[in-house]
């Protein structure tokens, strides 16, 4: 737990962005289940797809566990940089805000806010030239010698 507190005190924007993205994943999945039988069914399935992409981007353990093809690996590798990940998350957030023109959904509002927060944090980290540092609580130590 102390490593988590140290990460929060580090001032590294990528750590804040990762935790914002994890909240986004939670609300995207909640949005999927709460809107599957509403006018937002298309956005519900889009939110599930966005959550899957964010899981692969933000949780290194799933990159090791989930069988993905070379195209998906290339996609994940493409969004390793802070600026590109910020642009991707802005796009995800815009999709959530567009869903509100059809019908209001609390989960999609919160998902849009947290995804936009993550995008701003990644952009901030890019401006500050901060290297992407995954959180220790989400599988950051999956290098050589790890159990996976």
Image (tube, rainbow, N blue to C red):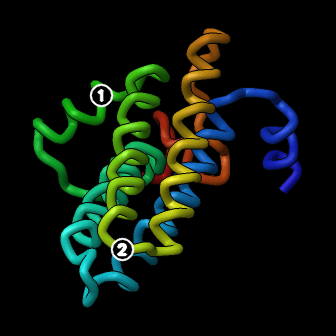
Question: Where in the figure is residue 62, as x and y percent of width and height?
Answer: 37, 55
Nearest to the observer: residue 41 or residue 144: 41
Residue behind mark 1 = 77
Residue 94 shows in the view: yes
Q: Is residue 106 above or below residue 3?
A: below
Question: Where in the figure is residue 91, as x and y percent of width and height?
Answer: 35, 39
Instruction: Look at the numbered discs 1 and 2 and tell me whether their residues touch, using CB distance below 8 Å.
Output: no
For disc 1, the neighbor class at 10 Å (few under 14, some 14 to 19, many from 20) is few
Split into 4 quadrants, where in the image is the N terminus?
A: bottom right
Question: Where in the figure is residue 114, as x and y percent of width and height?
Answer: 57, 52
Residue behind mark 2 = 103
- Residue located 72% across and 27% down the image: 12
Q: Is residue 99 above or below residue 72?
A: below
Residue 128 shown left or right of residue 104 in the figure: right
Residue 42 badge:
none
For disc 2, the neighbor class at 10 Å (few under 14, some 14 to 19, many from 20) is few
- Residue located 86% across and 47% down the image: 5
Q: Secondary structure at mark 2?
A: loop
Nearest to the observer: residue 12 or residue 114: 114
Q: Tell me the quarter of the picture where residue 55 sits.
A: bottom left
Marks 1 and 2 sit apart, C-alpha to C-alpha, by 35 Å
Question: Where in the figure is residue 104, as x and y percent of width and height?
Answer: 43, 73
Residue lying furthest front: 101
Nearest to the observer: residue 135 or residue 26: 26
Q: Is residue 101 above or below residue 71?
A: below
Nearest to the observer: residue 29 or residue 4: 29
Residue 62 shows in the view: no
């Amino acid at each position: 737990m102390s490593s988590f507190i140290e990460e929060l005190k580090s001032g590294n924007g990528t750590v804040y962005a990762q935790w914002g993205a994890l909240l986004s994943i939670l609300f995207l999945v909640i949005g999927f289940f709460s809107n599957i039988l509403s006018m937002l069914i298309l956005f519900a399935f889009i939110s599930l797809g966005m959550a899957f992409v964010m899981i692969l981007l933000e949780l290194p353990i799933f990159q090791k566990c989930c069988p993905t093809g070379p195209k998906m690996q290339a996609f994940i590798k493409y969004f390793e940089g802070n600026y590109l990940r910020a642009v991707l998350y802005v796009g995800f957030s815009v999709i959530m805000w567009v869903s509100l023109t059809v019908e209001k959904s609390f989960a999609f509002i919160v998902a849009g806010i947290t995804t936009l927060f993550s995008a701003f944090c990644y952009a901030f980290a890019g401006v500050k030239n901060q290297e992407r540092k995954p959180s220790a609580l989400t599988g950051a130590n999956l290098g050589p010698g790890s159990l996976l």
